[in-house]
Amino acid sequence: MIKFLLWIWQLPQNLAGWIYSRFAKQVIEYEGITIYYAPCMRAGVTLGQYIILDPIWKNTNYNYLIQTVKHEYGHTKQSKYLGLFYLILVGIPSVTRNILNRINNKKFNYN
């Protein structure tokens, strides 16, 4: 019952994560969360109880991968606490910051 209520509390991000994960390959379990690989702009994204990493992470240093998974796992905790407000308070600012950072890096040729 608690799992169901948590899923509803996080409905917008869980629904988006569930849909996104249907196009992804399941990889590993971490702390009860399934990690998926799917194209996502060479980044990672957490949508409720779904962590999705770009396939580029398959070829990275294992310790860096684990560090990234732990970071994304932290967002699953934020989603539990913030519920319906997660996308507004964490998701949108995070995506905006990521896009602006990429634009800035291209502008100054840091890639």
Image (cartoon, helix red, strand yellow):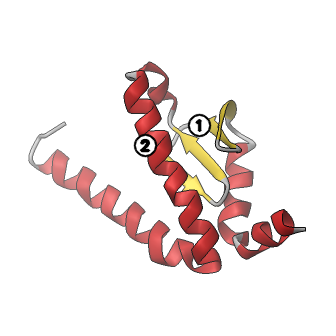
- In the displayed orientation, state which residue is furthest to the right: 1
Q: Is residue 30 positioned above or below 80 on the image?
A: above
Left/right placement of residue 22 relative to residue 86 reads right
Q: Position of residue 63 (x, y in %)?
A: 39, 27
Q: Label 1 neighbourhood size at 10 Å, few (<14), some (14-19), many (20+)? A: many
Left/right placement of residue 40 relative to residue 34 reads left
Q: Can you see residue 40?
A: yes
As measured in the structure, the alpha-carbon distance from the residue carrying label 1 to the one carrying label 2 is 10 Å
Q: Which image quarter is the C terminus in?
A: top left
Q: Which residue is mark 1?
A: 38
Label 1 sits on what residue type?
Ala
Which secondary structure lies at badge 2?
loop
Q: Position of residue 66 (x, y in %)?
A: 46, 33
Q: Is residue 13 positioned above or below 65 on the image?
A: below
Q: Residue at x 64, y 78 (%)?
A: 84
Label 2 sits on what residue type?
Ala
Q: Which residue is mark 2?
A: 43
